[in-house]
Amino acid sequence: MGGRDGRDEKTWVVYELTSSGEVLAAKGDLEPHLEVLFRESPLDDIFVPYLSYKCDGRVVLYNVMEGYCFVSSGLEEFRYFKAVEDSPYLWKVLHTSGGRNGSPALTTVTDAAVRDLKGKLSDMLTLRVGMQVHIRRGICKGLVGKVVGISGSQVHVLISLRTLNTIRTIHKFAILPVGDSDG
């Protein structure tokens, strides 16, 4: 099997948010909005660099890049531009002005850059063994579990279902502590 060059790596399209979009991101509701916005051509991945939950009656907010969100590239370019027209929460998609043919071209960032932001966001989140957590991504999305171990950026979570108890290893970025108003 041949090696891959940098052009084969995943890249991300960057959106600048409106002030309403920043509020939606802080509430944790921007990602579902983007999923609906792109439902006809689903995205492989979305990264909103905000995490928030309610604890002891106050909202705890973490963010590593205020005012922006990232979606995976790979769709036809016009779909990314159209999303700005269709959403009150997206101010603009980052792009360069027209080249030889006059058409704008999307500006993308590397997967490594987004992984770095995810790592920084995960590092901000304080978790401890015994803590109840809400799983936000992956095949266990929507479930609540209990932290039974932490290994660097990976968290071992006990998930108890009616007929099954299982421990899943999940990246810190994909979980949040169960807040005051959560299950």
Image: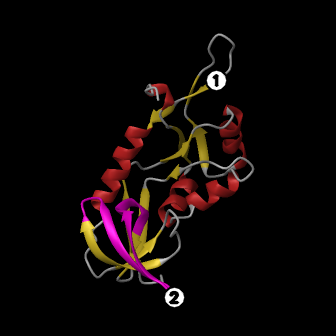
**What span is colored magenta in the figure?**
151-175
Instruction: Measure how far apart labels 2 and 1 are at the Cα level.
Output: 54 Å
Disc 1 element: loop
Return the residue found at the far top.
100
Q: Is residue 18 magenta?
A: no
Amino acid type at circle 1 is Pro
Disc 2 element: loop
Return the residue found at the far bottom.
162
Residue 146 place in picture, x, y as percent: 36, 80
Residue shown at 25% from the left, 75% from the top: 128
Kindly identify which residue carries mark 2: 163
Rendered view: 133 above or below 173: below
**Image colouring:** secondary structure
Mark 1 surroundings within 10 Å by alpha-carbon count, few (fewer than 14), some (14 through 19), many (20 or more): some
Residue shown at 65% from the left, 39% from the top: 80
Q: Point out which mark residue 104 bears.
A: 1
Q: Are marks 2 and 1 in contact (CB under 8 Å)?
A: no
Q: Looking at the magenta stretch, what is its main secondary structure?
A: strand
Q: Point out which mark residue 40 bears.
A: none
Rendered view: 79 above or below 55: above
Q: Is residue 169 magenta?
A: yes
